Each structure stands twice: as structure tokens, then as C-alpha cells.
Amino acid sequence: MDQLETPLSLVLFSGTDDKLSAAAVLAVGAAAMGRPVNLFLQYYAVDAFRSDRIAADHGVAPEATPAQRTIVAAHPGQHWSELLRQAKDLGDVSIHACALSMEMFSLKKDDLDPLVDDVEGVAAFMAGASAGPIAFI
Amino acid sequence: MDQLETPLSLVLFSGTDDKLSAAAVLAVGAAAMGRPVNLFLQYYAVDAFRSDRIAADHGVAPEATPAQRTIVAAHPGQHWSELLRQAKDLGDVSIHACALSMEMFSLKKDDLDPLVDDVEGVAAFMAGASAGPIAFI
Amino acid sequence: MDQLETPLSLVLFSGTDDKLSAAAVLAVGAAAMGRPVNLFLQYYAVDAFRSDRIAADHGVAPEATPAQRTIVAAHPGQHWSELLRQAKDLGDVSIHACALSMEMFSLKKDDLDPLVDDVEGVAAFMAGASAGPIAFI
């Protein structure tokens, strides 16, 4: 299997804007190279994709110092949800919400932004990951 | 090497219950598909596997809001140690404590829960990871 | 592609000393086995590689309890920058700063420690990662 066929799988656990932006940048980069990308949303990430709060301020990683927080918050970049939309336009990018996390947060598919394609279990996610890299973010 | 032969390697760094649960769910999912899984425990994760505190409350990721913390803590799921026990029953799942982290926390193999198979160095872990994915959690 | 040919790619996002040390240990382990290693520095990690503060105290992960913080800070190990220097002496290890994060923190290549080889975009990083594992740290 060469690189272009090997999917990139990203398990999104964190729901802070900096980590979601970093993930979205990796997704755009991979999609631009013609590589399939699977995102699997767990815990705080699935909560961040709720349609009623996807555009809200989700904060930054707790390790950020006040100076770093100011820099990251002030940076005029595209929102991670917009980057993910572009990644989906560019290539084969699918976004799945983890069934267990959906149940934990009492969420239904309709509660999530339309960027999310479906709700799936971990076995289906693992099958899609094939032999490719799996980054936990 | 096809997917079933490619091991999934998880480096567990964090010792919070939510990240350990997310890792255990990935391990169960991979083991159920017949995929070998190697866990390598470092830093706060190795501390969480101490037999005298594995069942204790290890908290959640610091990014969790009070509302999220309440939801995650109240969720009636199986404990991550029980999920890992099931993963080991299901398939080829091995759990290794990082030798450097053991030394840092002044721990001996007997201080850890029997879920942990052995103490190994990073070179041995890397050899076991082969060409498969390595997620850092 | 066998293991020795498959590069290990590490996306460093966090800038705390414990995570940077864990990453450096993985890099040394992989380099010692003859495996190419690519590090891609984003966000707080790129800030930690500034030549005027690489040797400063960058703290530990916010999840650390006071007891854990004391143990980790008191551990007499080599600094992660020294481990990375050794990894570069041992094998094919390259360290790239993410162009987007450099711009966010208003940094130029000369602001970074000479351990950093160059500034590159995510597409170049992805090309270098090939079909190998990508860990996000």
C-alpha cells in the first residue's frame, strides 16, 4: 500500500480550539495530497462539534501561558470548522462521532454540525483506519 | 503486511480516567478485530497502574469544563482496567511499563497491577511497534 | 516497506518538559534502531525551541498532581534538547518547525535553537511521513 492509498486517521479527544485547529491543518495537508482522512470524535471533541456551539470559543490547551493564550486567540486564521469544510471539498475526508461518546453526552446525530457524517463504533473506525497511522489529538 | 498483522501501539502518557478509558476502548476495538495491541506506559499512566491506586479516582483531562467533568464522572461505563482485562481475553494485547518512567517514580514491577506484563525499554517497545501506527495518548 | 525504512513522525504540539522528554526518548529509541525520524513542531512546542528559552523551565503537563510534579522535576535525567542532539548524532533525525505556527508566534528560523533544521509547511511534513506512524504529542 503506498502513501496515497494509506488513510490518515485522527482520533480527536480534545475540544480546545488550538488542538482542533492543529488537527484540521493536518487533515487539509493530507487531503491536498490525495490521501483519505478519517476523523473519529470522542469526549470533548464531539461536544465541540455541537451545532449550537461549534462557532463558540472553546478555549486553548490548559498548558498555555497567559502570553501564549493571547497570541493564539488573536491569530487571524480560518476557523477549524472552515478548514475541515475545505478538507472535505479537497478530498476524501470523513468525520465520524464515536457512539460511546455520543451516548455519554446524550447527543443525537442531529445535535451535531452537518460536517459530521455519521455516528460509528470503534470497530468500524478501526476497520477504516486500515494499516495507516492513527494520531490521538 | 495487512491490517490484521499490523500491531496497534499506544503510548499512554496521561493518567486521567477519561484518556485511559479512550485508550482502553481503542484497544478493545483493535483486539476484537484480531489485531495485536501493545501498550507502553509512561509518566502519569504508569503511576495510574499502581496496584494500590488503579481503582482510585484519577480525575479527567484539565481542559474539561465543570459541566463536562460532571457528565464524564457520572457516566456508568466499565472501568478502563476492566476494559483492558477484556481486551487481553479477546486477543493479543500486551501492556509494558516504560523502564525510565518506572525508575522516575521509584516503582518495581510488583507495585503495578497484574494487567502489566513487564517492564521494557523504549527500544524493545519500538521493535514491537513494527511498521504499525503509534498513538500517543 | 519494512520497519527500518518506515519513518516515525512526531507532531510536537505541547511545550511542557515532560512531553518533550517523552518525545525525545521515542526519537532516540527509533534512531538507535536505524529508523528515520521526523519531528514537526507546532504551537507551544515551537515556542519551547526558541534559542533564548530552550533551557528554561517549561513546566509539566497540567494534569500532574503536586506530588507527581515534584517527582518529575527532581528526576536527574538528560534534558530533552540533549537527547534530541544525541538522536541526531545516532541516526536520520530531522526537526521541522511548522510554518503556520512560526507565523502565529512571529518567529523566524534564527530565533530557534540550531537543533531545528528548517521551517516547512504541513504538506511537506505529510510527504515526509510517508505511510509510517504519526504520533501527536
Image (cartoon, coloured by chain):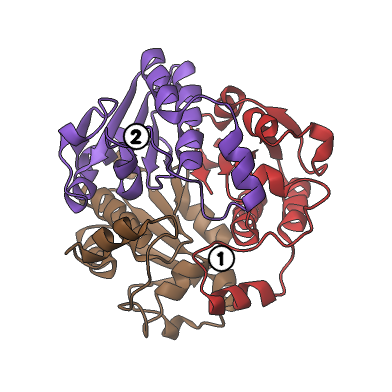
Chain colours: A red, B purple, C brown
Under mark 1, the amino acid is Gly
Q: Is residue A36 visible?
A: no
Q: Residues within 10 Å of mark 2 (few under 14, many from 20)?
A: some
Which one is nearer the viewer's eye here, C36 or B54? B54
Chain identity of mark 2: B
Left-right relation of A119 to B82? right
Identified by mark 2, the residue type is: Ile
Q: Which residue is mark 2?
A: B54
Report, in whole angstroms, how far the alpha carbon at label 1 lies from the one at label 2: 42 Å
User: Residue A83: which disc?
Assistant: none
Position of B110 with respect to C115 (left or right) is left
Pick the quarter of the image with the N terminus of chain C: top left
Tell me whether circle 1 and circle 2 mark residues in contact (CB < 8 Å): no
Q: Which of the numbered marks, if any, corresponds to residue C121?
A: 1
Residue at point 24%, 68% (across, down) = C79
Viewer-proximal residue, B73 or C123?
B73
B120 relative to B91, above or below: below
Res C17 → quadrant: bottom left
**Chain letter behind tag 1:** C
Secondary structure category for the residue under label 1: loop
**Residue farthest along the top direction in this orientation:** B89
